[in-house]
Image: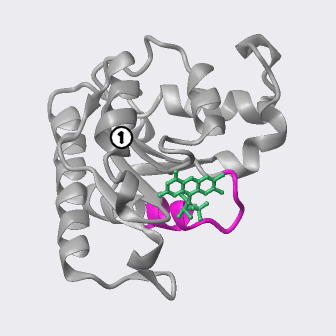
Amino acid sequence: MTSQKSIMPHIVAISGSPTLRSRTRSLVTEIQRRIVQETGAGAGLVDIAELVPSLMVRTREQASPSLEDALASVERADLLVVASPVYKGSYTGLFKHFMDLVDYKSLAGVPVALLATGGSDRHALVIDHQLRPLFGFFNAQTLPTGVFLSDASFVDGRIEDPALQRRLSVLVRESADAVRLRVASGGLKAA
Ligand SMILES: Cc1cc2nc3c(=O)[nH]c(=O)nc-3n(C[C@H](O)[C@H](O)[C@H](O)COP(=O)(O)O)c2cc1C
């Protein structure tokens, strides 16, 4: 008998900020919540801030159980929702180090929604110039709409700008459509 669990899509959010109580984390978890609400998928979170002590390794074989769990959850994901703050014009070094430990074959064809945060709009192209090529390396399927938010976009922790909200809604819709397509095509990793 096939269990219900084995056919449920799994959405993993990655917050690339090494800072606890980060804007990036609250953004990516809120977007993941909206996608889960639309799709009924299961959800997991990889928070780089929580993994910082365990990232002091050079190879996968050296990974602690918590780091290994985080890497394995990313490799099993049917959709990744990825957000990083901009550090020195790119994603954070610790996020890149985490991705360096992910099996390069595991993300082929996996849809990936891209978000980034930054101090100003100066580095808004981080999504297309840095994050998209990184997931291109993995042969992942980055979704068309990426969303960049500057610190000024967060008012009391909320995003009030209607134009940004519209763009986030497009990203949520594209993500939910990608999950539904994987369900319909029988392409779920756990299936
Ligand atoms: C070390 C460091 C480097 C940064 N470099 C940039 C940068 O190059 N461009 C930019 O727009 N913001 C830069 N910022 C600002 C952060 O991207 C921004 O404050 C972001 O919202 C922080 O997200 P968080 O709250 O999730 O950590 C930098 C911040 C730090 C701590």
Q: Quadrant of the C terminus?
A: top left
Q: Residues within 10 Å of mark 1 (few under 14, many from 20)?
A: many
Residue underneath mark 1: 9
Q: Position of residue 17 (x, y in %)?
A: 61, 52
Quadrant in which residue 60 is drawn: top right
Q: Secondary structure at mark 1?
A: loop
Whether residue 154 is visible to the viewer of this picture, yes or no, is yes
Q: Main secondary structure of the magenta part?
A: helix
Q: Is residue 93 left or right of residue 185?
A: right
Visual colour scheme: one colour
Q: Assign the N terminus to one quadrant of the image.
A: top left
Q: Quadrant of residue 178?
A: top left
The location of residue 57, given as percent across then percent down, is: 80, 22
Bounds of the magenta segment: 18-30
Query: Is 141 rendered above or below residue 170?
Result: above
Amino acid of disc 1: Pro
Q: Is residue 142 left or right of residue 89?
A: left
| Residue drawn at x 34%, y 53% as measured from the top left | 124
* Vertical arrangement, residue 84 with respect to residue 121, above or below: above
Task: Inspect this view and state whether residue 78 appears.
Answer: no
13 in relation to 54, above or below: below
In this view, the residue in front, 3 or 54, is 54
> Along the line of sight, which residue is nearer the eye, 169 or 92?
92
Residue at position x 48%, y 41% in the image: 90
Q: Quadrant of ligand 1?
A: bottom right
Q: Residue furthest bottom?
A: 156
Where on the picture, by quarter, is residue 184? top left
Q: Residue at x 77, y 32 (%)?
A: 55
